[in-house]
Image: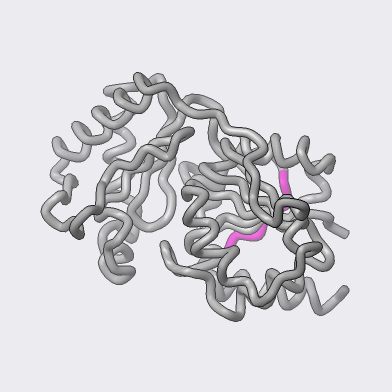
Amino acid sequence: MKKVLAFDVDQTLNVAKTPITNDIAELLVKCLDHFEVCPISGQKFDQFLIQIVDQLPNPTTEQLTHLHLFVAQGTQYYRYNPEKKDWEQVYNYPLSDEQVAKITATIKQAAKELGYWEEDKLAEGDEIIENRLSQVTFSALGQKAGTEAKYAWDPDHEKRKKIVARCKELAPEFEYEIGGTTSINAVTPGMNKVFGMTHLLEELSVSKEDILYFGDMTQPGGNDYPVVQMGIDTIAVRNHEDTAYALRGILGIL
């Protein structure tokens, strides 16, 4: 029996950049009675709250203590403090200002050279490159773009593969991973989901054999692939419907 269920977020628990469905929310609350539940994603902390935590139907304090938020690929970790009745940051490994500036300039140059800098399509107040403290994220159409536009922009990942290849030429000292529908996450070497999952093992005092991971980008180059390489049991899903199907099966045998 596994002790931990870990999840990618976009395309695994939800439609990219949208709140989880009522179905997924109800299943996650049931999972909290039996497992430590650990979403891990390139998203910011605020997005974890908006897309996951705030959607859970009346979770108890006890249930929330079994929910662990591994933000920015696990380079930031938040857990629920039942005494304060609020989330607290356990650790954070931020990039330096110089690293953020170098990554930002690199991605912008690569996207512009390749004709993939879509600044004219941004919603007011939105941005293409975002500093998420421990990683820098490129979102080709910004965060506020509609789901349909995001799905259509790079369905085969070919645009982002070209951007990543050029970034590696310009600034090879960083790592670049494709995630979500239009995103590229840039970090310092080793600060990917291997880092996050390694800290998950330490923080929860579990072994790799205790974890079952769900992700939609498990292919080489995808941001879930490092978890596969670690030897953690992984269920590759196409969308949140696949995840819901698997969770019903798991809960059904308990």
Residue depicted at 76% across the width and 39% down the height = 203
Residue depicted at 60% across the width and 63% down the height = 53
Instruction: State which quadrant residue 149 falls in.
Output: bottom left
Q: How is the image coloured?
A: one colour
Q: Is residue 252 above or below residue 210?
A: below
- Give 116 or 221, whichever is nearer the viewer: 116
Quadrant of the frame with the C terminus: bottom right
Left or right: 70 as drawn, with respect to 35: left
Q: Main secondary structure of the magenta part?
A: strand
Looking at the image, the residue that sits furthest to the front is 84
Q: Is residue 247 above or below residue 69?
A: below
The answer to whether any part of residue 127 appears in the image is: yes
- Give 155 or 3, whichever is nearer the viewer: 3
Residue depicted at 77% across the width and 57% down the height = 66
- Give 152 or 43, whichever is nearer the viewer: 43
Looking at the image, the residue that sits furthest to the left is 120
55 in the magenta segment: no
Q: Is residue 135 above or below residue 38?
A: above
Residue depicted at 54% across the width and 31% down the height = 191
Question: How far across and down, in percent of the image, does residue 61 sit?
Answer: 76, 63
Part of the protein shown in magenta: 232-237
Quadrant of the frame with the N terminus: bottom right
